[in-house]
Amino acid sequence: MGSPEITKGIRARGILAWLLAGLLVSFYILLYWDQELDQQIIYDLIIDSQIKDGDVISPEQRQLIKQAALTWQRPTELLEEYLPLVKKIQHSITAQSLLNYLIRPLDGLAQMLRGQKADKWFLYGFLYTALVVLMGARFIRKWKYEKYQKMRTLSVMVVQLMLAFLLPNLMVAAGSKEFYFSYFWPLKIEYFLPSALSELPRSLFLWGLMMSFVAVPVLTYFFGKRWYCSWVCGCGALANTAGDDFRHLSNKSTLAWQIEKITIYTILALAVAMTIVLFINHYRGVRDGFSDFAFAVQKWYFFFISAGFAGVIGTGFYPLAGTRVWCRFGCPQAAILGILQVFLSRFRITTNGGQCISCGNCSTYCEMGIDVRSYAMRGVDIKRASCVGCGICQAVCPRGVLRLENRW
Ligand code: SF4
Ligand code: SF4
Ligand code: SF4
């Protein structure tokens, strides 16, 4: 199958899907790069005000004006006379004004939970959690006769609400650093970088290490990738709740599978290499060409992988390419879990080939693009690195052919 074939499905999506994708992509771009988008406007307004008032604003005050305009918090050193300019900037900046329409109504809740005004990341966490909880309730209603679906969805809803929203905010209110207990290296790559050594309390740093290098292999040995991707991870939570209506859009071709194997392990290799380079740089402790290189690698990794791929494409492409684009083609955590699942785990999907009527429901609804039917028809166990153990293939099978099992 050639590459035009692989994009055929995406190109054939209706106008509504493209509009929704455009909206989601724009929101993510606004969220990540609002300050960059507004940079020039702020600069022009400051220059404009200087020309009009014949005043020369010092570089320090310019910085404070910019800071006040972008954060909506007045730094104490900012002179009173510049407040009208700050206000003018706030009401002129397109990206900021757009975001502020959404952020400001959450100030009360943010004050209550984290003891400070809302910012764009509070807005994001709030919207994300609300979607997981509301759409999770809808999902549970839809699958009310499927115990496995109800349990795992309840699990991701509780984890998202408690560990990825309430607790991190309450930690800030208590004067601690915001920390997400449900994410670990390499998905939350900053939890095992040299910066974490200085920024995180030692206990949290050790928690992250323990989860990444002990809990992940042990739990994956017993339960496969599903314990994390379908029961804990917030990205999987959004995909399986808010993104449930798009799960069937994932590409099932062999070419997509081949691409997936290349991209996911390449990103894992990049994540590992970046971590090693940053630690070498940290322990060398000198500023030279190597340290410039290390920081450039870090900057581009966060730009392309963490923001661009995981955020903008990972969620923005739900209506075009299915809900697990990032999980399937990008997530370095998935790459590790996948290797463990294939070579070490007791988890597999067993098939009773004699019962299969080849209806194809299982393949259609597999969000990871696995051609489940081809395994079922041959009566072969499914042990694929990408399978997140969501169990939907089992739930939609009319003949009870498939079973998710943790067995030898
Ligand atoms: S594949 Fe990665 S992002 Fe997706 S659910 Fe699993 S760990 Fe989370
Ligand atoms: S094979 Fe089944 S359990 Fe695995 S990801 Fe696909 S639908 Fe989910
Ligand atoms: S849904 Fe069941 S019967 Fe239909 S193809 Fe898949 S395994 Fe066979």
Image: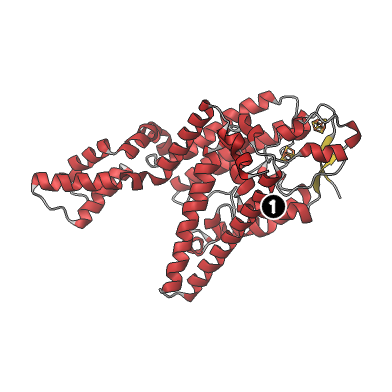
Q: Label 1 amino acid?
A: Leu
Residue at position x 12%, y 53% from top?
56
**Residue 25: x and y, percent?**
47, 38
The quarter of the picture where the N terminus appears is top right
Pointer 1 residue: 337
Image mark count: 1
Q: Is residue 77 visible?
A: no
How packed is label 1: few (under 14 Cα within 10 Å), some, or many (20 or more)?
Answer: many
**Residue 265: x and y, percent?**
64, 56
Determine whether 329 is above or below 237 in the image: below
Specify whether 214 is left or right of 19.
right
SS class, disc 1: helix
Kindly indicate the quadrant of the structure image that contains residue 362: top right
Determine whether 356 is above or below 379 in the image: above
Q: Nearer the viewer, residue 317 or 3?
A: 3
Name the image colouring. secondary structure
Specify whether 345 is left or right of 17.
right
Residue at position x 75%, y 25% from top?
145
**Residue 112: x and y, percent?**
43, 37
Farthest-out residue, left: 54
**Residue 260: x and y, percent?**
65, 49
Determine whether 333 is above or below 240 in the image: below
Kindly indicate the quadrant of the structure image that contains residue 392: top right
Residue at position x 81%, y 50% from top?
346
Mark 1 C-beta to ligand 1 under 8 Å: yes
Kindly indicate the quadrant of the structure image that contains residue 99: top left
Residue at position x 25%, y 51% from top?
64
